[in-house]
Image (cartoon, rainbow, N blue to C red):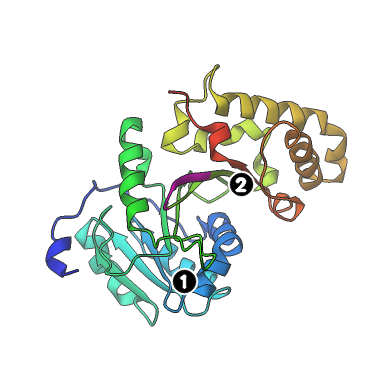
Amino acid sequence: MTSRAFARPVGTVTRGTTNPNRLRRMDRWIAHTHGAELRRAADPVAVDLGYGAAPWTAVELLGRLRSVAPRVRVVGVEIEPARVLGAKPYEREGLVFRHGGFEIPVAERPLLVRAANVLRQYEEGEVGGVWERLCARLAPADPVGGARGGLLVEGTCDEIGRRHVWVALGPEGPRTVTFAARLGSLERPSDLAERLPKALIHRNVPGEAVHAFLRDFDRAWAAAAPYASYGARQRWIRAVRALAVDWPVVDGPGRWRQGEVTVRWEALAPSA
């Protein structure tokens, strides 16, 4: 694939707001969930799509992924040329910055594309097309070899990384939704509703699955109030354990202790 193919970036410029450590919860989940796929590959490439006005998130992604997959390389991609120019001094072995957008201007099929706080400014109806475009660029699955292929992680967090919600997608499409928080910052789990990704944020209304999920989560949280004396983490674990009776929670206590819970996409997907 030649550089000519990447002449016209696809997408629009974001606000570019970023802060150091803003995406630490998402990064740690990626390292835990996708680390084996990254280690398996001879030359794994990860893309930080829309890293913003400063390169901190791409620099941090490299460090966190290399703690589990030492051969990984990170490409920071930004649609605003001035941001790419400003990031160039931070390039190092394993980290480069390129001008581009949803077309993903790398010759390789990446094993990871992280798009954090990128789609929030788009219309809900545009999300499906962007997902399809990005998933088509992911490394394919290899059923014979057991590889699940590349991973797209798309979601939203607050300015200092206390509250996140993201969707994980493979080459075949959406897989899971993860809710993650600094538990001391929550009054109730539904506080995370304001960080729902674009595909879900307008669906937090009666009759939609994500609304029912957050309602049930709040009820489980309230029922777990006696565990608050042992700390917010123990209350969260108890609430998620109760929630998992009726909802397809796919992770376990090891992740719940991190202030996370991951649910199958199809259980929360918007109605037609």
Q: How many marks?
A: 2
Kindly identify the residue that appears in the image at 11 percent across and 65 percent down.
Answer: 4
Front-lying residue, 195 or 5 = 5
Marks 1 and 2, Cα distance to the nearest angstrom?
21 Å
Q: Secondary structure at mark 2?
A: strand
Residue at the spot of label 2? 180
Residue at the spot of label 1? 62
Is residue 247 visible to the viewer in this orientation of the structure?
Answer: yes
> Where, quadrant-wise, is the N terminus in this rendering?
bottom left
Q: Secondary structure at mark 1?
A: helix
Amino acid type, callout 2: Ala
Q: Tell me if 192 is positioned left or right of 48 in this view.
A: right
| Above or below: residue 159 compared with residue 95 | above
Front-lying residue, 168 or 218 = 168
Highlighted range, magenta: 171-175
Is residue 166 visible to the viewer in this orientation of the structure?
Answer: no
Please identify the residue farthest to the front as the structure is shown.
144
